[in-house]
Image (cartoon, grey):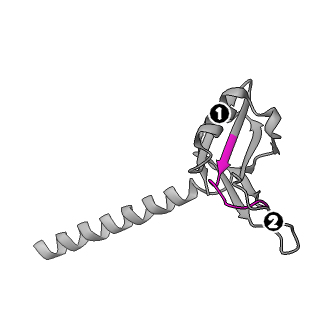
Amino acid sequence: MGRKVLCIWCFLALILGLSGCSAGKDRMEKVRDIEFTVVNPDEIPKELSEVIAEKQDEGFQLTYGDKGYLYMAYGYGKRDTSGYSVEVEECYETEDVVRMKTNLLGPAKDEEIIEESTYPYVVVKAEFVDKDVIFE
């Protein structure tokens, strides 16, 4: 009889565990795309620009809220040559978070490369959303 009770408890725990996992997964699904604009370096708020300058060597993932806007910044750290750029692949909202996926693009094959330190990054501006941002 004890074995039967143990099996029932194991079965219930398994069912509850599986349902909890799927509920967590659903919370990470896209609710809506976020409209955004890539911000020119001279239009980045001063406070955010200063933090970017401090962290540009090692790379960064930053958010900044200002005047109803959310700024999301992703930097890839120091590179030894020119020609790098950052592409925003996706930016969307889930039930719990905002997700921003970027890609570092290397120099084009036909591009003239200059041997100098560069710090590829992107800053996007969107309507303010009071959620954590996950950078990918």
Give the labeled residue for mark 1: 64
In this orientation, does residue 66 appear?
A: yes
Question: x and y percent of residue 76 in the render?
Answer: 64, 55
Of 99 and 32, the residue lying toward us: 99
Instruction: Reply above or below: 70 against 105.
Output: above
Of 131 and 48, the residue lying toward us: 48
Q: Is residue 78 covered in magenta?
A: yes
Residue at figure coordinates x 30%, y 70% from the top left: 11
Q: Secondary structure at mark 1?
A: strand
The secondary structure making up most of the magenta span is loop
Give the labeled residue for mark 2: 113
**Image quadrant where residue 130 sits:** top right
Residue at figure coordinates x 65%, y 32% from the top left: 50
In this orientation, does residue 1 appear?
A: no
Question: x and y percent of residue 110 in the render?
Answer: 88, 73
**Image quadrant where residue 71 sits:** top right
* Foreground disc of the pair 2, 1: 2
Tag 2: residue type? Ile
Q: Identify the image quadrant of the N terminus.
A: bottom left
Q: Is residue 99 covered in magenta?
A: no
Question: x and y percent of residue 25 in the render?
Answer: 53, 60
Question: Going by the image, does 20 lie left or right of 92?
Answer: left
Magenta-highlighted residues: 72-83
Question: Going by the image, does 71 lie left or right of 56?
Answer: right
